[in-house]
């Protein structure tokens, strides 16, 4: 940042994977993980916020006008390959763990959208935290796909600052904020609020002060499943898919929401 003129640089790339260990075969299973491994994966995912803040602090020093983008062009969960597949192809399954990982990460990107102007999973199909898995002439949509589809309402919208307080996701290994949130207003005036509960066993009841936002209506969609290990398979393509959500209500200037365990919710006001 100090030595390269801004006119020669449009962006700086930052990579961060939620990985248990970088040793070969030590990244853990994509589907059969322990509670301890789940917590560590979520801790690694939420570290993205600190990494962006610290990168941005350096960039702000040399680029206070924020002309140069921070590009998070590799992120996601990285696990051992599926048994019986080529180790070099990095083919892994995709569970509800990856859904909440994706939602929480996107909320972080939205929070820092003045600086983070590009962010993308490293691969889209059959590799790492893919949105599509294929087998012969068959195709399935992963939980991560559904999160990205649900969040597309935020594209080309204006970020609305929002804070949330919730109980922590607490284990013997430590504690993490259970809920993350982001909000935006689109060009038609609709406000979308995306919420994630990473706690795999406890629901979270939260409230959001709308502060003058007049809601003429409220709809919502949710992505969740009974178990954080659940995933779509070629035998059951739609085990996990978005459905209507009725766990939110508006009373005056207050929006109250009850988030089920391990869930991603997008509301439209």
Image (cartoon, helix red, strand yellow):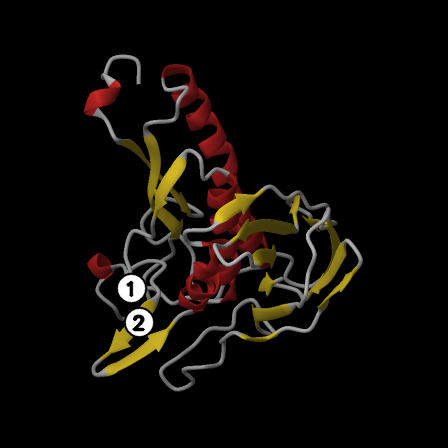
Q: Nearer the viewer, residue 197 or 30?
A: 197
Which of marks 1 and 2 precedes in the sequence? 1
Q: Which mark is residue 192?
A: none
Helix, strand or loop at mark 1: loop
Q: Position of residue 19 (x, y in %)?
A: 42, 47
Q: Position of residue 96 (x, y in %)?
A: 51, 66
Q: Position of residue 24 (x, y in %)?
A: 31, 49
Q: Nearer the viewer, residue 77 or 223?
A: 223
Position above or below: 234 against 119:
below
The quadrant where residue 142 appears: bottom left
Position above or below: 63 against 150:
above
Q: Tell me how far mark 2 sits from mark 1, CA to CA.
A: 9 Å
Position above or below: 26 against 150:
above
Mark 1: few/some/many CA within 10 Å (<14, 14-19, 20+):
many
Residue ID for mark 2: 133
Helix, strand or loop at mark 2: strand
- Which residue occupies the extreme top position in the image? 3
- Which residue occupies the extreme right position in the image? 252
Q: Is residue 184 left or right of residue 136?
A: right
Position above or below: 136 against 53:
below
The quadrant where residue 64 appears: top left
* Residue occupying image coordinates x 61% and y 49%: 180
- Image quadrant containing the N terminus: top left
Specify whether residue 11 is in view.
Answer: yes
Dots 2, 1 in contact, CB < 8 A: yes
Q: Nearer the viewer, residue 169 or 53?
A: 53
Residue ID for mark 1: 91
Mark 2: few/some/many CA within 10 Å (<14, 14-19, 20+):
many
- Image quadrant containing the C terminus: bottom right
Q: Is residue 7 left or right of residue 81?
A: left
* Residue occupying image coordinates x 45% and y 47%: 20
The quadrant where residue 248 appears: bottom right
């Amino acid at each position: 940042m100090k030595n390269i003129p801004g006119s020669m640089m449009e962006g700086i790339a930052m990579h961060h994977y939620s990985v248990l260990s970088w040793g070969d075969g030590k990244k853990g299973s994509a589907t059969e993980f322990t509670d301890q491994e789940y917590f560590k994966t979520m801790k690694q995912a939420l570290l993205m916020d600190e990494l962006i803040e610290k990168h941005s602090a350096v960039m702000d020093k040399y680029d206070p006008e924020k002309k140069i983008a921070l590009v998070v062009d590799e992120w996601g969960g990285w696990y051992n390959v599926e048994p019986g597949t080529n180790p070099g192809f990095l083919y892994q399954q995709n569970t509800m763990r990856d859904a909440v990982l994706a939602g929480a990460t996107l909320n972080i990107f939205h929070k820092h959208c003045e600086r983070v102007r590009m962010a993308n999973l490293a691969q889209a199909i059959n590799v790492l935290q893919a949105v599509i898995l294929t087998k012969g002439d068959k195709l399935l949509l992963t939980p991560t796909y559904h999160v990205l589809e649900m969040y597309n309402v935020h594209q080309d919208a204006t970020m609305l600052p929002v804070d949330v307080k919730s109980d922590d996701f607490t284990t013997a290994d430590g504690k993490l904020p259970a809920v993350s949130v982001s909000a935006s207003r689109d060009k038609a005036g609709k406000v979308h609020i995306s919420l994630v509960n990473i706690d795999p066993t406890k629901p979270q009841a939260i409230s959001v002060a709308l502060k003058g936002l007049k809601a003429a209506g409220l709809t919502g969609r949710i992505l969740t499943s009974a178990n954080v290990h659940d995933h779509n398979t070629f035998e059951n393509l739609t085990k996990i898919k978005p459905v209507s959500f009725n766990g939110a209500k508006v009373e005056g200037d207050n929006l109250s929401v009850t988030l089920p365990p391990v869930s991603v919710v997008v509301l439209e006001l």
